[in-house]
Every structure is written in C-alpha cells, then in structure tokens.
Amino acid sequence: MYNTLILSDLHLGAETSHAREATRVLKENRFQRLILLGDIFADLNFARLTKDHWKFLGYIRKLSNPKRNIEVVWVEGNHDHGLTNIMSHLVGVRVYQHYAWQYAGLRHIAIHGHQFDGFQVNNVRLSRLGTSLYLRLQKLDFKSKPIVRLIDRLNTRWLRMSSKVSAGALQHARQHEANRIFCGHTHVAIQVEEDGINYYNSGGWVDSRLTYLTVNEQGVRIHEYNERADDRDSSQERGETDSSFADFADESGLLEDIEYESIGS
C-alpha cells in the first residue's frame, strides 16, 4: 500500500500515448492517493481519443468513487488547459494548479512544471501550433513512432527543460517551505537533491521509457513499467465517438449510476 502514486504526461489523444499500460499500473497497485500530474490530454480534440484512452478515464472515475476511499487529484498541465473543468466533472476529480500535502512529517508539493519552462510561458500560441503539427506527424510516422519519439527527446534536450524545470521547482519548494516537490512536463524521470530539498520528475507515458512515482514510509521511488507481450496489441482503433463514450460509461460504472438515478427519480 503506497501513500501516493503519481503519473503524468499520458497525452490521451496522441498516437504515442500508452493509456492501456497506465491503466494496468493503476489496477496492479494499491494506494491511498493518486495524483495525475498534468498533461493527461494531448489537446482539446476528443475525436483523437481511442477506446483505451476512454477506458483509462473510466477507471479514474471508478477510483474517484467515495466508497473506495482513495483521494484522486488532477494537477493541470499546459496541454490540459480548457479540458480539466469538463473532464473533472465527468470523472469526478478535483483539479488544482498547485497541490500540497503532509506525509511522514514532510511537506510535499505537486505542480506540473510548465510554469518553470520559460519558452512555454512566453510562447503559448507557438507551443500550441507545435503541438498540432506534432500530433499530425504522429499519423504519418511508422507504427512504433520512432521519429516523433526522437523529436520529443531532442526537444527536451534542446530547450534544456529538465534542468530549467528542476531549478525552478527547487526554488518554488524553498519559497513554500516544502521538503519534496514533484513535477512532470519534461517526460524525463529524474531525482535531484539540493540543500535538503528533493525534486522528482515523474517522466511520461509517450516514449519507450514509461515511468511513475510512489511515495511511502520508505521514501520516494521511480518505477519503470516493462512492456508485456499483450501490451503490443492494444486495440488502438478509433471508433465512433458515441461508441468510445459508451465504452467509457460501461468501464466507469457511469451507466449504473444513471440507471440508479432514474429508478430513484
């Protein structure tokens, strides 16, 4: 049983999103708190969502059921902007820009990290255009998406996002008297310690290295998901929107809720 499980940068709607594997991680672990640390979506286009993407959202809705006694937190990322208010109601979770909690006598902070990326902050429109072109390129790439994954890694290194985000996050932690701070955004899972403050990045779910974080009494651990044979056949076909939503409603128990409410009324 973990106190907290953290994953970020799933980019639902992207061809490279490993939503099925992320759902498996949630089902195979026990935790008291789940933090979705931003960029759960790739963009505002729901038509890009596959059946596996809807199933992930359906499982989040299941976890957010009060009967499960699990706190589900969504920290908004730059790609989520404009979607979180809608989806938070649909999957039943609260959305934060900055989330803090106490555990084991330490103050923890979760923030997506784009706030410390100067290029993203100063070039919002250009970043959105780049995202749109990147998503289109994914459709033209080979099945394993080697080109777009290479671009993603080169982009992270060229903009030096890992060092920029870690430096900004550590400064943010000092200002808010936190012992640990968690970010996403860079798609690179790392840990940095400075003056007794620990910075952790949860990595992402769009590259070949799929990572997430856990927090318990033993400390913070970076986990790497190992792909399995049955993950490679992930039924990523995009059906009609109504069909995909029906899958989500069935997976999440939303249909049961609707039936119960109709009986009650």
Image: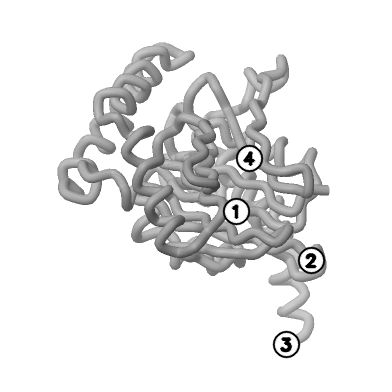
Mark closer to the observer (3, 1): 1
Q: What element carries label 3?
A: loop
| Mark 2 surroundings within 10 Å by alpha-carbon count, few (fewer than 14), some (14 through 19), many (20 or more) | few
Q: Is mark 4 on a helix, strand or loop?
A: strand
| Mark 1 surroundings within 10 Å by alpha-carbon count, few (fewer than 14), some (14 through 19), many (20 or more) | some
Q: Mark 4 is on which residue type?
A: Leu
Q: At which x and y percent is residue 73? A: 59, 61
Mark 3 or mark 4, which has the lower sequence index?
4
Q: Mark 2 is on which residue type?
A: Asn
| Mark 1, residue position | 35
Mark 1 or mark 4, which has the lower sequence index?
1
Q: At which x and y percent is residue 247? A: 64, 48
| Mark 4, residue position | 213
**Badge number at residue 265:** 3
| Residue 206 visible within the image | yes
Quarter of the C terminus within the rendering: bottom right
Query: Is 217 in front, or is 145?
Result: 217
Q: How far apart are marks 1 and 4 (CA)?
A: 10 Å
Q: Image check: 243 left or right of 165?
A: right
| Mark 2, residue position | 69
